[in-house]
Amino acid sequence: MRKTIRRIALLAAATSLLAVSCATGEEDDSALTAPLPTAVPPGVSLTIAANNARVALEASGELGKLPFTVSSWPAVSAGPDVIQAFRGGSVDLATNAGIPPIHAHATGFDAKIVGVKVRTTPLYKLATAPGSGINTLADLRGKKIAFSPGQAQGLVVLRTLKAAGIRTDEVQLVEITGPKFLTALQAKEIDVAPLSEPTITKYLDKYASEGATAVATPAVDALSVLWAPTSVLRDESKVAAVAEFVKFWARGEVWAWEHPDEWIDAYYVKDQSVSVADGKRILTTVEKPYFPEKWDEAIAWEQETIELVTSAGFFGKSFDAEQLFDRRFEKIAYDAVSAPYRNKGA
């Protein structure tokens, strides 16, 4: 009798483990390949870290048309901070450059890219500390460079050094996150840091008179992405909301491009606290948004990035960039915009 009871108990335990395994394994995998829902169920909410999208949707009047609730728009933008927020469950969806998803994968966190916008021109310039003596890329040798390996700025540094023919051991890479770049520059703890607009304009307005400059770099940060933890994409209700937001995100980028005066007022002046004149000048450097029908080139660019950062000793071993993308979302942004935003140079 005792042997029979023991066998039954073992069988029950095995059955329970099998059920758990199926629930957490095969079913989860199938959820990530199942067709996307066509409608958002009532009561769905997302927490979204995408400030530019928020401003564009508010200014265009589209925010109220979202078929779900945005419970909050956390002011989280740096890649490492977004990954931490993903891990803590405080952010469901975020906008970033192409490098944070690579960083997340390297740390064992599973997330997927669900939206892609492509850029072909440099977004960053190299801001220099007063008295650094940096006027050209060749002057970077021996200098202290702000470096955040998990952010776009870190990739820009690596691509800049490669373009200039400078090895990483010929400079001092000072590992700090992007939000600390300005403080480090101002304190002259570093000689140079990659900055984008409008941050670089605000920095030069304050320190150009003391000798601070901005050196152009050929390094292109090619991708802007929407991405989400796979735990969110496994949730049938939330994944439906994510798919809808991809459309609003793409159309928000188009609205900002087509309404420059309103965008300058809403974003550059009211949200970023720069002047109208600076906003107009910055817009002349902004590239028209482009959303590709196929992600093959974006995946190839991510693969090239993976090889660059891993060969430089960051993020462990190389892996297949295809793992970072959820192809179910591939055409959503493309279909949401008109023809001029579907083709490069159109």
Image: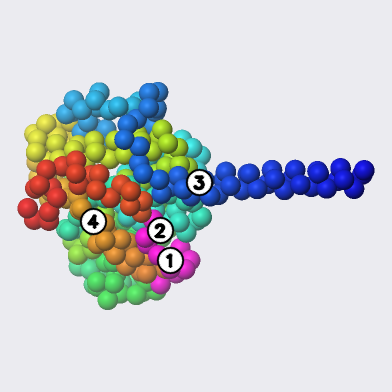
Q: Earlier in the sequence, mark 1 or mark 4?
A: 4
Q: Disc 1, disc 4: CB below 8 Å?
A: no
Q: Label 3, label 4: how many angstroms apart (C-alpha)?
A: 26 Å
| Residue 11 is one of the magenta-drawn residues | no
Left or right of 288 in this view: 233: right
Q: Disc 2, disc 1: CB below 8 Å?
A: yes
Q: Nearer the viewer, residue 229 or 258?
A: 229
* Part of the protein shown in magenta: 311-324
Q: Earlier in the sequence, mark 4 or mark 2?
A: 4
Q: Amino acid at mark 4?
A: Lys
Q: Earlier in the sequence, mark 1 or mark 3?
A: 3
Q: Indicate the position of residue 319 as horizontal and vertical percent values.
A: 43, 66
Disc 2 is placed on an element classified as helix
Left or right of 5 in this view: 122: left
Q: Nearer the viewer, residue 261 or 127?
A: 261
| Residue 317 is one of the magenta-drawn residues | yes
**Viewer-nearest of discs 1 and 4:** 4
**Residue bearing the label numbered 2:** 323
Q: Earlier in the sequence, mark 3 or mark 2?
A: 3
**For residue 6, above or below residue 158:** above
Find residue 58 and name its label: none
Confirm whether residue 209 shows in the render. no
Q: Label 2, label 1: how many angstroms apart (C-alpha)?
A: 8 Å
Q: Amino acid at mark 3?
A: Asp
Find residue 294 and name its label: 4
Q: Earlier in the sequence, mark 3 or mark 4?
A: 3
Mark 3 Cα within 10 Å, few/some/many (few <14, many 20+)? some
**Residue bearing the label numbered 1:** 319
Q: Which picture quadrant has residue 139?
A: bottom left
